[in-house]
Image: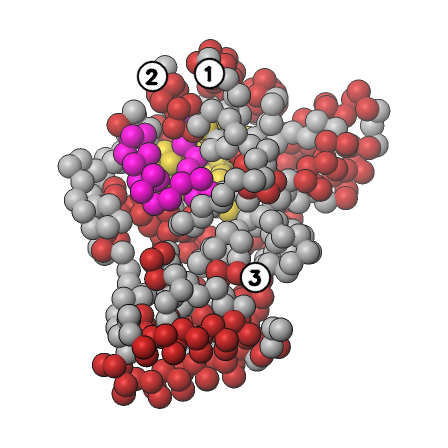
Amino acid sequence: MITTSRLERVLNSGRFAVTGELNSPDSADPESVYERALVLAEVCDGINATDASGAHVHMSSVGVCSLLTQAGYEPVMQMSCRDRNRIAIQGDLLGAAAMGVRNVLCLTGDGVKTGDHPEAKPVFDLDSITLLKTARSMCRQSRFMSGRELEAAPRFFLGAAANPFVPPFDFRPHRLAKKVEAGAEFIQTQFCFDVPRLQQFMRVVRDLGITEKVYILAGVGPLRSARAAEWIRKNVPGVYIPDVVIARLKGVRTEKQVDEGKRLCVETIQQVREIPGISGIHVMAYRQEELVAEIVHEAGLLPRGRHVRGGIEQTSQAAVR
Amino acid sequence: MRVGLQRYPRLLEVVYEGSYWLLRPFRRWMVPGGAIERVFVALEKVLKGAIFDCRMCGDCVLHSTGMTCPMTCPKNMRNGPCGGVSVNGHCEIIPEMQCVWMQAWERSKKMRVYGDDFLGILPPPIRHLQDGSAWINDFSGIAGQVPSGWVE
């Protein structure tokens, strides 16, 4: 199927992809989206629009994505199952496709208890895997889940998340395999602060033959301070930060910790790039979007479009796939 | 009053298999909406409730999920653990509870007949079957259906 996803073309061409996360604003002003997008777009092949991340209310991902497509950016729309049932999800997918969204990241979503509206009713009618299946059948079979036919099918480059850093570790590669079977074409992982764990995970993933079927982008991000790292470790579900990372941040003076966090992120990027089967990175800099450009620059990934996977510059590997 | 039988997934699997073949000859009487369903609902509530903490979704997949009820997962996941499991293997939403899927995965490894089902993709529950009899929905073919839009 011909795709109009820029992110997919970047990955197909064998280039090392960079995506970045845009933190949706608490604002009704489109400018607040464009300000954030401007700094990310310089260095990213795709911009993730979060869907009420951490169960906190922000501008919707559909809204952010429609603003981004209007201005010619390449959004990755995050779609979670927490706030919508299968009726709303499929409707939003059609609306997003009509607005020019070409990449969708299918997520289950965080529980409402960690958010700012813990009294809310969690939906979870579908889960990430059944959402992927549904989105794929809309694209390929041109049908809703019910079997009813669509007038025109959407064309999405479908993505999913993976978290190799939390238990059950021996099931995580199988869960990834399930997501690929359900329709995932690219994967963005949770924050990686534990490179050996990712290496181990990727070894199994390669043995299962999954890297032949999916592009995996490793999630990375700068830690602002040792205190912030400790807070994240305690309060953000699914983010694992080893003690050595916190000790390293504590090892420098408080005002220098931002730089140390950034340096750590750059080093992580350089390490994950060497792992076979890693096709790119996904940079998540919570409320520090301006740092993303610096990180990508310092990691040696600029100018965009020249860097081929595996760290070696060579002609396109696309034909191999 | 949970019964500790879930420690024996292999036994439960055999009981499930046995019940299936025992009930199968009577399947044409097993239709929803009658007195027989009321009996089954009552039995399932008591037995499956005690053993699995069953939530009566009416669309039972226990044998495919390590004889562990996926509806007891606060996110009602049907295809494995979410990414929010904490390092000690506990649930992100109910931190004092062990992740349902961690237990399910360990149990499924011990199951010889249905253990591999764990790696397959399960459709979402059919929500209007809630509070009905899973056995009756199963035999009458209402439950366990793949959504028609998914069929390739």
Say which quarter of the image contains residue A140. Answer: top left
Badge 2 is on which residue? A70
Q: Residue at x 30, y 25 (%)?
A: A100
Q: Secondary structure at mark 2?
A: helix
Residue B94 vs B120, above or below: the answer is: above
Residue A170 lies in the magenta stretch: no
Residues at marks 1 and 3, CA–CA distance in whole angstroms: 40 Å
Name the chain under label 2: A
Say which quarter of the image contains residue A283. Answer: top right
Point out residue A116 in the picture as x, y percentages from the top left corner.
Answer: 59, 33
Name the chain under label 3: B
Quadrant where the N terminus of chain A lies?
top left
Q: Which mark is residue B100?
A: 3
Q: Secondary structure at mark 1?
A: loop
Q: Please identify the residue farthest to the front as the structure is shown.
A: B35
Are labels 1 and 2 on one chain? Answer: yes
Residue type, label 3: Val
Sort mark 2 into few (<14), some (14-19) or many (20+) by Cα contacts within 10 Å.
few
Residue A88 lies in the magenta stretch: yes
Query: Is A307 or A235 nearer to us in this picture?
Result: A235
Q: Which mark is residue A28?
A: 1
